Amino acid sequence: MVSFMNPIGISPVSIALPNRRNSSAPPIVIEPTAPINTGKPMISGEPREGVTLVATRGVWSTGGVGISSYEYQWLREGEPIQDATSETYTLTADDNYNALSVEVIARNALGLGIAESDPTGRVAPAPHAPVNTELPTITGIARSQEVLAANSNGQWTGNGDELLDFNYQWLTDGVAMPGKTGTTILLTDNEVGKRISLRVTAINSVGATVVESLQTAAVIAAQFQPAIVSRPTITGVARSSYTLTVSTGTWNNGGSPIHTYTYQWFADDVAIAGATTNTFTITDAELGKRIRAEVTAINAVGSITATTVPTAVVAEAVLPPSVITAPRITGTARQYETLTVSDGEWNANDGTISGYTYEWKRSGVVIPGETGNTYTLTADDVGKRIQAFVTATNEAGSTTRATSQTSTVTLPLKPVAITKPVVSGTVAVGEVLTTTDGVWNDNGNPITAIIYQWRAGSTNIAGATNNTYTVQSSDIGKRLSATVTAINEGGGTSSITDQTIIVPVPPEAPTVITNPVITGLAKGGVLLTASTGTWNVNGSPITEYLFQWYAGGLEIAGATAANFTPDDNHAGSVITVGVRAINALGTSEEARSAGTAPVRPTVEPPTNRTLPFITPTNASPDSLLDADSGNWDGNGEDPVFSYQWWKDGVEIPGASAITHQLTEDDIGAFFHVVVTATNSAGSKSANSSQIGPVTSSISSNLVLDYRVYDLAGMPKVNVSLPLDYEILAV
């Protein structure tokens, strides 16, 4: 290719050259091209961290127009390394254990050519002191008189294949133990209650690194096999067919809990085959022999055996008790009466009767819960027969004997009047008469009800069935009396009072005894209620009451019921009510009540009942404070609430929402909120209690942008650390 220069640059053209070998042949035509690599680029330098590698660009065909420039791009495992675009490249820790190559780019006017070198070997780390990748560990029991050992030195990376040396130092609660520099340590009582750890120092030709194992549990006191404090004992009777029981005895566990007790029974010091529980039932094979037991206590350290004192010589078995005289029931077979069963007379049959138990049956059916020697008859027993069963027990067992059945249980006796009832009160129309119950003998059967019937002459008065009776105008000219009936489960008995004097004709209209009373809150929209007061009917029942309400002493038009609701037109006025009573003889004079307090308006400004409060009370910069309005009385109208937040006693501009977000600027500050309740009658404000100071908080995974250096001095950035890491310097 032939190139010609022009003012703009190189302009490649195709040219024809004569064929010198054959002048008659066509000329040879040479076409210009982009650069072509004919010999790969090469890298020189040792592949080790910190070494500078040098690239040669290789051999290129110029394409007939020359090469204008060469460019370089270093690659790590085939991926471009940022900013690595020169002929040289210094290896970093990021390159460790990776292979590097270099791309060379040749350019001319017609384009570019790219060639990549062969890769280097794997980059080796720079020489460095040992680096721990797994902490050393300790084996053994953390207990006095036990040996702890370094289970491993941990895992380390060093300076290539260079072997490491290790030194050791044992620590108690983080403090070095003088002279304890071997791979094992014997614990003593001096270490009880403390935690043990091991400090391991790894050493190579570059330097040394120290790490510490995790601490053991607190060292406990030395432990021993159990020691007997008080020997086991046997309970039970040494007699054939009886069961003996052995206790464990009392032991000192030697500092290690006793986890098992084992047992072995002996007859005259010969082990009884299979008798290895804490109980043993004697057989005839043991007659004439003494029984003892061995108890073995076992803990984690070892075992010790203790022996009981032998029993008395085993005697023959006894028989259960047998009856001589059967038990019998005494008492009256009537509801509410108490029956008693005797034990009867028994033969103990060479044993000792330890006690008696009892069971009662109703017509052959067991009565639940009745297990004493007495039984009180109930309504369920009426019409049925009762029987008792007595069981006698001795060492050999129990025997039960029944009584004969009682006669059929009957109802209890009816009440009997001792003194008749008496009527008291004024015998006049409208007056109340009262009868006593009288005095009764219930015959052992509780009186369950008293009923009453009033009579006019010899005729029962319809509906007059209480112990009181208000004399009616229909009773005028008649004598009154009351029949009182006492009832128990045996039936009812009646007793009649003496008759009263003849009921006289009433003389006049009602007269007031106590004035009417107004109840209710004197406030617009609130209902007031008037009582009638109390009246003397003067012989003729009151048939009607008339009401008139007053405001400030003036009649309120239309307010003539027993109830009245004031409105805002009555605000400030004192309310009273007048009542008139009417009977057959006329209308009474008006009885006027006392006045109320001045009437309050229907709606009043709100009233705070419980103060507002803020949650949470333990706040941090990321807390959202929330205001609770507290409890308010709207006084007739629901209030609307507004809020203003305060910081360290100063109002916070614009902080008028129900919530307030804290920031880092609030650390150490105190806050409260003012809540204002408003209705149509006005506003009232209340302050919450103050919370604070606001304390700083750190999230459980904090990412800090800070610089950390490894032992080789290489920087690390944007490292995420859990909170239990201690940052020594920033």
Image (cartoon, rainbow, N blue to C red):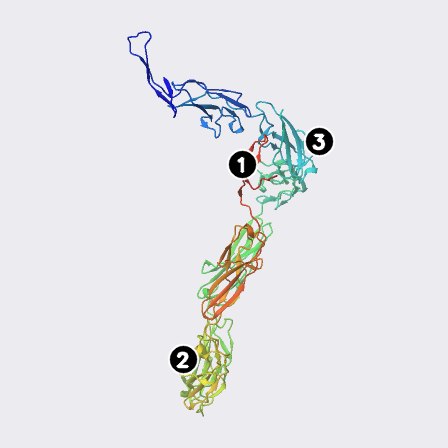
Other-residue count near label 2 (Cα within 10 Å), few / some / many at <14 / 14–19 / ≥20: few
Question: In front: 450, or 649?
Answer: 649
Q: Position of residue 12 (x, y in %)?
A: 36, 21
Residue 463 numbered mark, or none:
2
Which residue is depicted at the point 58% across and 47% down? Answer: 318
Q: Residue furthest top?
A: 21
Dot 1 corresponds to which residue? 717
**Up-down relation of residue 237 to residue 422 (above or below):** above
Residue that appears at 58% across and 56% down:
670
Q: How far is mark 1 from mark 3, CA to CA?
A: 41 Å
Q: Residue under circle 3?
A: 179
Q: For the N terminus, give its image quadrant.
A: top left
Q: Of the residues under marks 2 and 3, which one precedes in the sequence?
A: 3
Q: Residue at x 54, y 36 (%)?
A: 717
- Disc nearer the start of the sequence (1/2): 2
Residue pushed farthest front?
7
Check the image and report above or below for 226 versus 518. above
Name the element at disc 1.
strand
